[in-house]
Amino acid sequence: MKVALITGITGQDGSYLAELLLEKGYMVHGIKRRSSLFNTDRIDHLYQDPHHPKQRLKLHYGDLTDSMNLTRIIEECQPDEIYNLGAMSHVKVSFDTPEYVGNVDGLGTLRILEAVRLLGLEKKTRIYQASTSELYGGLAENKNERGFYDENSPFYPRSPYGVAKIYGFWITKNYREAYNMFACNGILFNHESPRRGETFVTRKITRATARIALGLQDKVYLGNLDAKRDWGHAKDYVRMMWMILQADKAEDWVIATGKTTTVREFVRMSFAEVGVELEFKGKGVDEKALVKKCNNPEYQIEIGKEVLSVDPSYFRPTEVDLLIGDPTKAKEKLGWVPDYDLKDLVEDMMRSDIKLMKKDQYLKNGGYTTLNYFE
Ligand code: NDP
Ligand code: GDR
């Protein structure tokens, strides 16, 4: 049985990847952080009783800032594959905690690579590093001749997160070249899902749309509506992580859809899912979205209601304006074909958030909650 170790197993990607690897018959080890509240919601459905002799999912307490802990866990698991997905992954928050991000997202990668080397597992253990399109920084002049970022485009990170991840990228490549390790970077563009963290823009939008439709919230405040992102579905992207480690040769890979969309358009698409047509008025910090039509009798949102305002506190000190990736190499060499397009993604997220918020509405209407955790 193949053995995998996933850092960041409690996150969006970690949870989908754990599902995929369990389906493929792997023994899956995951590193979770100690927290004062349960933080395993995304993988609770995969939980297996540790007393069961055939247990195939095992969680270990750990942290990417703790070399000894990482070395001990890797020694204990003897993994065939390590997926280093653990990170402080929020770009805006990285401006508030830059040193911590450098330590976890940058040095954390080194700690994994060095532990594998010190334990003499260089030949056995393949390593996937969660790199990111944030490395490119959205500089227009760095796109290829077809107008995309690809494996050869230069980097110009625009946040402490991007700078920390660029260290992770290069140290992975360096260990591959210096010690002949099978260590690969997946340069993944934004990928979302119903399990996306609530403070990333897509989930913030789908969650707020569902809550507004159900009368649980008046409006949503967002930052830069002009930002453009290449959004895919996390399920398609974790499949690619696995494919990268099954390849004949260790390389770096861009994973993207090849299409880019504004935050404003994502808002429009989400509201369309509940039958609401929006009208955007004003510019910059004065921009607003009002309800123009409500075609779904289930949701009683009054015409003219303001459902979105811009709050400049969500602007970033340096912004990545536009990202669009070229997945040609992954498609041609690994045969990657995504199942979801953006419309499918928005539908999936909205369906899930409507269901979740209906539960919330039921509890609220029934008087079962005195405190609304979401407000
Ligand atoms: P999430 O934020 O959903 O998950 C991050 C995971 O890392 C969580 O399990 C978190 O634990 C864990 N973690 C955070 N800090 C530490 C630490 N100090 N030690 C150990 N674990 C830690 O991110 P995603 O699942 O979306 O992303 C996975 C990886 O891919 C990240 O490295 C991210 O930077 C990268 N990436 C993501 C993209 C995307 O669009 N989603 C695109 C490109 C790259 P806890 O649950 O306790 O917080
Ligand atoms: P990003 O994702 O920074 O691309 O990083 P995020 O969803 O946070 O932002 C995307 C764009 O939306 C704009 N925006 C807002 N963003 C947030 N979070 N909240 C808002 O209210 C808001 N309003 C507008 C942002 O300015 C930005 O331009 C994600 C993370 O998953 C990283 O870990 C990963 O590496 C990259 O994607 C690829």
Image: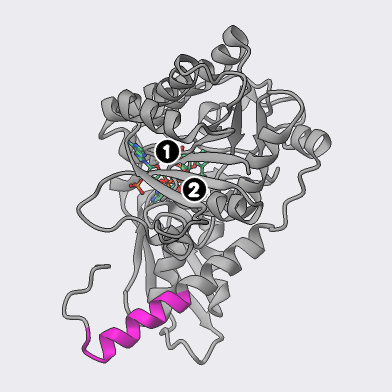
Quarter-of-image position of residue 124: top right
Q: Which residue is mark 1?
A: 86
Segment tinted magenta in the rendering: 354-368
In the displayed structure image, the side of residue 349 where residue 215 appears, left or right: left
Q: Could you tell me if residue 225 is visible in this image?
A: no
Q: Nearer the viewer, residue 16 or 88?
A: 16
Quarter-of-image position of residue 244: top right
Which quadrant does the N terminus fall into? Answer: top right
Within 8 Å: ligand 1 and the Cβ of disc 2?
Answer: yes
Q: Is residue 264 above or below residue 277?
A: above
Which quadrant does the C terminus fall into? Answer: bottom left
Within 8 Å: ligand 1 and the Cβ of disc 1?
Answer: yes
Numbered badge on residue 47: none
Q: Is residue 105 above or below residue 269?
A: above
Q: Is residue 319 magenta?
A: no
Helix, strand or loop at label 1? It is loop
Please tell me which residue is depicted at 28% across the width and 46% down the height of the picture. Answer: 313
Q: Nearer the viewer, residue 320 or 120?
A: 120
Kindly indicate whether the residue at mark 1 contacts the one at mark 2 (C-beta within 8 angstroms): yes
Q: Callout 2 environment at 10 Å: few (<14), some (14 to 19), or many (20+)?
A: many
x then y, percent, for residue 285:
35, 50
Q: Nearer the viewer, residue 257 or 54?
A: 54
Which amino acid, mark 1?
Answer: Gly
Please tell me which residue is depicted at 37% across the width and 29% down the height of the picture. Answer: 72
Helix, strand or loop at label 2? It is helix
Numbered badge on residue 14: 2
Please tell me which residue is depicted at 41% across the width and 62% down the height of the picture. Answer: 44
Question: Ligand 1 is found in which quarter of the picture?
Answer: top left
Which amino acid, mark 2?
Answer: Gly
Magenta stretch: helix, strand or loop mostly:
helix
